[in-house]
Image (cartoon, rainbow, N blue to C red):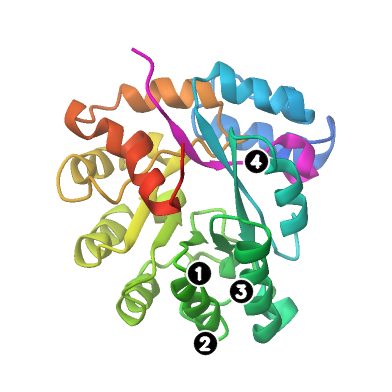
Amino acid sequence: MPRTIIDLRSRPAFLHDFYGATPGSPGFEAAKWLNRRVGARDDSHFTRSTTLDGFLAEIHDAGITAAALIGRDTPGVSTSNDRVHELVTGRPQLIGVGSVDPQRQGTAAAVAEAERAIVTLGLKGINVEPGFLDPAIPFDDPLLLPVYEACQHLKVPVFLMTGPTTPDPRFNDPAPVGRIARQFPNLDIVIHHGFWPHVADIIGIAFRYPNVHLVPDMYLFLPGTRLYVEAANSFLRDQFLFGSSFPFRPMKQTVDDFLALGFDGAVLDKLLFENARRLLALDL
């Protein structure tokens, strides 16, 4: 029986060379390399998404109901909120998530842009990537706190980019997230990449703070899987969500691999759909 599935992390290749937009470029080769590292059986599958039609077909063929298109605002990779809005408008299979960089914009402008992204553009959350700024800053840096406060006020989640590709590993530390969760108890915090490889640490923080949500996406299939699955099958069942991290892992393979990991049947619909629907206030 087909399942309803929401993919909480996806980007088409055509958005940037970093996602593999240009064959033969360093970004293209890096995308292939990362696919191999996280277990993709086809390391160049993402070339289908060099067009919007190809990206939408990829979503459809994977059996995914809707995919969250994650905007980025970093010195290295930027996708404007207006571009995200343009791509998701009129396409129910796409969900828009905006992004801000208070280091580049200044705090006041970043807060204003977050409000515009949500209120005017209708995006469903705000992505921030402090470990990829220049210079990198921790997740609880004072520069970011007004953005968190704005998201809490707007009742939308903040998405945090984590993981081992952070240029300086010191900024892939889960501890600051516990401090944010305590300071902003009504803010939903979504952890992309699940703070891998610090699996036990972030699971402990999510145990303590129910406003912390984990999306391990492509790192779910690396060492540490058992801890994620055990947590999702028990106390984390309302705080764990599916993501493919496309284009760095194939959508269909990731759905199939996810279903084979040993999640209890009683929690699968929560992980694949219900948690995301509630978190993003989706009407699907």
Please name the amino acid that badge 3 sits on.
Ala
Measure the alpha-carbon separation of dots 1 and 2. 15 Å
Say whether disc 4 or disc 2 marks the residue closer to the N-terminus. Answer: 4
Spatial separation of the CA atoms under disc 4 and disc 3: 23 Å
- Viewer-side label of 4, 3: 4
In the rendered image, the vertical position of residue 71 relative to residue 275, given as above or below: below
How many neighbours does mark 3 have within 10 angstroms: few (below 14), some (14-19), or many (20 or more)? Answer: some
Kindly identify the residue that appears in the image at 33 percent across and 40 percent down.
Answer: 274
Dot 2 falls on a residue whose secondary structure is loop
Q: Amino acid at mark 1?
A: Phe
Q: Earlier in the sequence, mark 2 or mark 3?
A: 3
Q: Which residue is mark 4?
A: 11
Give the CA distance from mark 1 to mark 4: 23 Å
Q: Which numbered disc flags the more N-terminal residue, 4 or 3?
A: 4
Residue at disc 3, secondary structure: loop
Q: Mark 1 or mark 4: which comes first in sequence? A: 4
* Residue assigned mark 2: 142
Helix or strand or loop: what does disc 1 sit on?
A: helix
Residue carrying label 1: 171
Q: Nearer the viewer, residue 175 or 256?
A: 256
4 and 2 marks in contact (CB < 8 Å): no
- Looking at this view, name the residue that lies furthest to the left: 234
Q: Which residue is mark 3?
A: 136
